[in-house]
Amino acid sequence: MIRTDDLKVFIYSVEEGSFSAAAKRLGSTPALASSAIQRLEKAVGARLFIRSTRTIRLSEDGERYLAHARAAIDALEAGERELNSKRDDISGTLRISAPSDLGRNVLLPWLQDFQDTYPDLSIDLRLGDHISDLYKDTSDVGIRYGVLGDSSLIALPLVPDNRRIVCASPVYLEQYGTPASIEALRQHNCLLYQIAGVAYDHWPFVLPDGNKTIKVKGTFASDDADVVKRWGIAGKGVLYKSRLDILSDIKAGSLVQIFPTDHSPLLPLQLVCPHRTSITPAIKKLTEFLRERFHLYLS
């Protein structure tokens, strides 16, 4: 018989990279975690990890079994939620991870309104521009830009037709001129966003005569997208940002769009969940709420 706790030790060992870290996460001991793995391996009749003196890694059988273990735990937890609460009950804590700029300047007041609508619900908002691991950081949902790469996650579209746009402040354009073409960006100071320490300095475009990527350079770079936008508003250079991040600044006149929106590839915004069984009533309501707010925001 397979124990639920043994499955959790297995999953957490994969996510944390060691039995001792998994044990710490569960409030247990390394010895008990190691025993749990041995017990699970005996139950399934396969070796799940390849062990050395300092490291562990999944075996081929362990790779195949991991998705099933996660699905089993997800199903059990969904069953507990079903039994312990009404299906229309919007309560508890909803842990949300979101990009820094969008989260701070667009989502923040909306989430306050959402919580006002459901006062029994607590919001735990984590802002950052790294791609969060929803399994490891215990977020219930992630709000993410781009096409979903991990097929084990579930994506609920919020703004599927969103794109990046090129823009700059009126002060910058008055001083340095407006780029007349995509190629002209090479001669401008472009504000760079960093992903995992690497500057996003190859800007892709979808032009009438074909796709093109421009290598740009600039004197400012940051791993915080909100900081990059603030430099743009301050007149320090040219931005290539999600339209959702800067729409209010364009409407206010603090930023000016330079090229047509459809000159950039799609950058869809999605609400992402670890598994379909983790889509709670609160997450369903949040998805509906955000879709409506984004529709109004873009109109």
Image (cartoon, grey):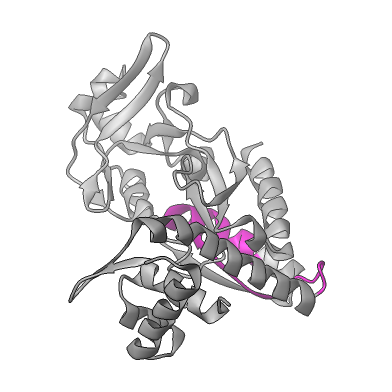
Q: Is residue 232 left or right of residue 7?
A: left
Q: Position of residue 165 (x, y in %)?
A: 43, 32
Residue in the foreground of this view, choosing between 41 and 195: 41
Q: Residue at x 49, y 50 (%)?
A: 144
Q: Is residue 4 magenta?
A: no
Q: Position of residue 280 (x, y in %)?
A: 70, 64
Q: Position of residue 118 (x, y in %)?
A: 75, 70
Q: Residue at x 29, y 54 (%)?
A: 223
Residue in the foreground of this view, choosing between 243 and 12: 12
In this picture, which residue range is highlighted in magenta? 86-112
Quadrant position of residue 188:
top left
- Location of residue 144 with respect to 215 vertically, above or below: below
Q: Is residue 253 left or right of residue 210?
A: right
Q: Is residue 110 magenta?
A: yes
Q: Position of residue 28 (x, y in %)?
A: 42, 90
Q: Residue at x 38, y 67 (%)?
A: 15
Residue in the foreground of this view, choosing between 230 and 272: 272
- Location of residue 236 with respect to 107 vertically, above or below: above
- Location of residue 76 with respect to 68 vertically, above or below: below
Quadrant occupied by the C terminus: top right
Residue in the foreground of this view, choosing between 78 and 280: 78
Whether residue 19 appears in this view of the structure is: yes
Q: Is residue 277 left or right of residue 58?
A: right
| Total numbered badges shown on the rendered structure | 0
Whether residue 98 appears in this view of the structure is: no
Quadrant position of residue 37:
bottom left
Quadrant occupied by the N terminus: bottom right
Q: Is residue 252 left or right of residue 61?
A: right
